[in-house]
Amino acid sequence: MTIRNRITLDDLPTMPVGDIAALPGDQLALLKQEADERLRAAKNLSDWLDGAIALKYGDQAQEARRAEGKDTGTVRLKDGPVTVVAELPKRIDWDQTMLAGLVEQIRADGADPAEYVDIAFSVSERKFTAWPHHIRQEFAPARTVRTAKPKFRLLLGEEVC
């Protein structure tokens, strides 16, 4: 009978999160490294499999779309008992400079551009913090700061700077 020196990833699902949090930092770091490596390996395997599936069904899906008179969208293929749902979504990018010109043209013609396009404003945080104080004060009421999900990196044998 061997006694293990540390908790493994396989132990974690049965442990209360408080017990996991109470583990020494070096064990947490090793567990996180192992979990990240498993995730990377699983992602690579999934990408490899997706490539094989695309190779197997890509031409058939393209032909099915062509037969339906469309370049994008969803088609269904049969492969024995398997139904393959092949999606080729549209990704539309608009030239922002051209859109701005068109919005101004609509406005100049007396129409409301909001009836035709969605208009959104944003300010990069870098620009905001570089502005003079009096300009920041004017914009501050329009600014809301929310936090994102916290992230932690655990480095073994490296000093924190």
Image: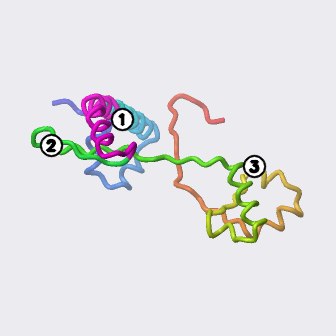
- Looking at the picture, how far across and down is residue 48, in whole percent? 32, 29
The correct choice, above or below, for 5 with respect to 127 in the image is above
Q: Amino acid at mark 3?
A: Arg
Q: Residues within 10 Å of mark 3 (few under 14, many from 20)?
A: few
Query: Vertical placement of 90 versus 30: above or below?
Result: below
> The residue tagged with tag 3: helix, strand or loop?
helix
What amino acid type is highlighted by mark number 2?
Answer: Val
Q: Could you tell me which secondary element the residue under label 1 belongs to?
A: helix
Q: Which of label 3 and label 2 is nearer to you?
A: 2
> Which of these two is toward me, 2 or 120?
120
Would you place residue 69 above or below residue 144 in this image?
above
Q: Residue drawn 83% across and 51% down? A: 130
Say the numbered circle drawn on residue 126.
Answer: 3
Mark before the other along the chain sequence, 3 or 2: 2
Seen from the viewer's position, the closer of residues 37 and 133 is: 133
Category of crowding for the residue at label 2, using alpha-carbon neighbours closer than 10 angstroms: few (below 14), some (14–19), many (at least 20): few
Q: Residue at x 29, y 28 (%)?
A: 55
Q: Which residue is mark 2?
A: 82
Measured as percent of width and height from the top left, residue 161 is found at 66, 35
Q: Quadrant of the rendered structure where residue 136 is?
A: bottom right
Q: Which residue is mark 1?
A: 43
Residue at the left extreme of this rendering: 81
Q: Seen in the image, is 143 located left or right of residue 47? A: right
Question: What span is in magenta?
Answer: 46-72
- The residues bearing labels 3 and 2 have C-alpha atoms spaced at a distance of 51 Å
At horizontal 10% and vertical 43% (from top left) the residue drawn is: 81
| Alpha carbon separation for disc pair 1 and 3 | 33 Å
